[in-house]
Amino acid sequence: MEKKRRKLTQCPNCGYTFEEVNNYCPNCGQENHDLNVPVKHLVEEFLEGTLHYDAKFWVTLKYLLFKPGLLTEKFILGQRASYVPPFRLYVFISLVFFFMLAISPNTMQVGLNQEEAMKQLGPEEREALAELDSLQGKVPAPIPAQRLKALVDRAQSNDVNRDVLREKLIKNTSFLMFLLMPLFGYLLYLFYRKLRRNYVEHLMFSIHTHAFFFILFTVYLGLKFFLPEGVDIFAAVVLVTAVYVYFAMLRVYKQGYLQTLLKLIPVSFIYLLCLAIALLGNVVVSLMLS
């Protein structure tokens, strides 16, 4: 959709006199567009130009949610002008996701306070834990285990600002997910190397898949505000994600049901292993820097 410009007669930056066809100043390059307007117009332009908040956005969202792999397939076929670009889509959706993650009450928690956890145990469990602690005191733990235990103890103490720690965890997690996204694409590239497709095609698949997961997890975080205490649907979120990725792979790579499943399993296992290691490292680093 073409941008509606409020053209000036003279460049406010360098004084060049515009012609009617000039969308940018030929002298200094500044855009020929008057920004001295009410805030309402600026917000509308932001949604239009940055987020493509129009029919294009809603069509893209519909295909992303209900047509697994279709956006990637259309990108590969060169049908791109009718949809929000993959990177822009990912950035917008991830911003919403990490905002929800930041305000959600029961996420990114390191653990319960030790006293609170002890209160939830019965007399027998407390005695068993006390005996285990006494045995651990007699047997020296490996150095990495000692350091990890020290970090956990520090997280449970009052020495750590929980708000600062939470902020660091969320910030680092957003960066980690951005790094893991091309990793998932590279795993697909390796497992489908016989198809001789460019890595960019696998990367687009990864971007759309992560965007779907962020939307699904955003809905999950929103539902946690209303679900009764003790009710968790995280397993359902994981199942829906797995089914979505499976059908997306069927559409994009066009291989049989069993062949696709035999590639989904190792790709998912390797990716989830890398994700677990990255998240554990994130917790350790965040604790050390808090």
Image (spheres, rainbow, N blue to C red):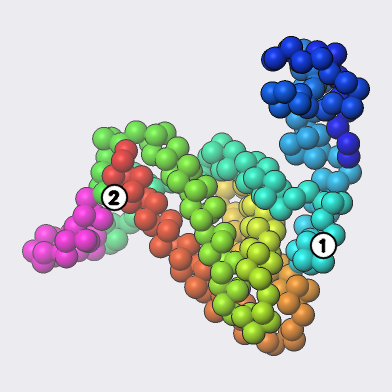
Point out which mark residue 152 bears. 2
Could you tell me the amino acid type at mark 1?
Gly
Point out which mark residue 78 bears. 1
Label 1 environment density (alpha carbons within 10 Å; few <14, some 14–19, many ≥20): few
Q: Position of residue 127 (x, y in %)?
A: 22, 60
Answer whether residue 243 is visible to the viewer in this image: no
Most foreground residue, 212 or 49: 49
> Compared with residue 67, is residue 25 higher up or lower down, i.e. above or below?
above
Count the numbered circles shown. 2
Q: Is residue 220 found left or right of 55 in the rendered image?
A: left
Q: Residue at x 16, y 65 (%)?
A: 142
> Compared with residue 209, is residue 229 higher up or lower down, i.e. above or below?
above
Q: Are marks 1 and 2 in contact (CB under 8 Å)?
A: no
Position of the C terminus, as image quadrant, is top left
Q: Position of residue 143 (x, y in %)?
A: 16, 61
Secondary structure of the magenta portion, mostly? helix
Which range is magenta? 127-150
Residues under labels 1 and 2: Cα distance?
50 Å
Position of the N terminus, as image quadrant, is top right
The answer to which image quadrant residue 247 occupies is bottom right
The answer to which image quadrant residue 46 occupies is top right
Q: Is residue 178 found left or right of 15 in the rendered image?
A: left
Q: Residue at x 45, y 46 (%)?
A: 172
Q: Position of residue 89 (x, y in %)?
A: 71, 48
Answer whether residue 270 is visible to the viewer in this image: yes
The answer to which image quadrant residue 202 occupies is bottom right
